[in-house]
Image: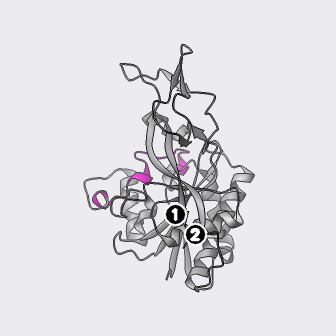
Amino acid sequence: MIKQLAIVGGTHGNEFTGIYLLKKWQKNTALVERSNFTTEMIFANPQAYVQNKRYVEHDLNRCFSQTDLGNNQLNSIEQIRAKEINQQIGPKGQPRIDFVIDMHTTTTNMGPTLLLTSKGKFYNQLAAYVQLHMPNAMISCDEDHKSNEQHHFLSSIAMDSVMIEVGPVPQSVLRHDVFEQTELMTMLILDFIELHNQDAVPQLPKSITAYRYLESIKLPLDAEGNRAGMVHKDIQDQDFMPIKPGQPIFVSFDGEDICYQGDRVVYGSFINEAAYYDNNIALSLLEKVTLSTD
């Protein structure tokens, strides 16, 4: 039974969609209220928003492992803010809040994507419900083998949570379609939880297609660690489309194709994400999986 829920926006200060949705819902809280649970709203990283940055010192969405939250020597702006949020809706391991929805946007062509970081019938049914009412929604399983204690995401404070990623939208920009898709997916999650609490989940497809994270691939680098190439035009904007062995995924600045060396078909996401350039991450590789709702 989920009794208390939190919706989070602005975990990254230059992802405006979630921040302005919070502003909208704070003016009319009835939009996010449901009959059998309470809903709180949290603006996660206001200092980064004021500075129009993803983060000031550390990525806030990487500051919530159990170990880091318990380390008082970690005292950057985001590390301190993580501890504040943990006190507000946690503490992690014994949280006050039962469920977290954390809203994000991406510069990549992922469309509306529901990220699941845990496994189980509840999550599979939630994903199926969202996709039933939002057929263009993609389902991505992001290290769903990990326990909450191991996850470093903000949403992992709660025992149950999901993240929303919608794109493409540039950093520090609002797009009407992305705003609408994020709001619709959030409403569907709230509706499903209300039905689940009532033991009234409607008939759903017996299974759905999803994509499970395998690994991240870096941009080509030279011996000195400088970028030596870029994402190939053939996979640019092709999130969740197949990448075959031997297919070009990068091109060097000299025009030479650099091909995928794996031995099976995989799928890409977060392809050429602007926010990941600080770590030279070019894309995530995924496998296609089937989630059962039974």
Q: Is 28 placed left or right of 152 in the picture?
A: right
Q: Is 155 placed left or right of 223 in the picture?
A: right
Along the line of sight, the residue nearer the viewer: 213 or 75: 213
Q: Secondary structure at mark 2?
A: helix
10 Å neighbourhood of mark 1: few (<14), some, or many (≥20)? many
* Magenta stretch: includes residue 114: no
Span of residues in magenta: 49-68
> Disc 2 vs disc 1: which is toward the camera?
2
- Above or below residue 162? Residue 89 is below
Q: Earlier in the sequence, mark 2 or mark 1?
A: 2
10 Å neighbourhood of mark 2: few (<14), some, or many (≥20)? many
Instruction: Give the labeled residue for mark 2.
Output: 126
Percent from the top left, x then y, of residue 155? Answer: 46, 63
Along the line of sight, the residue nearer the viewer: 294 or 240: 294
Instruction: Give the labeled residue for mark 1.
Output: 162
Residue type at mark 1: give it: Val
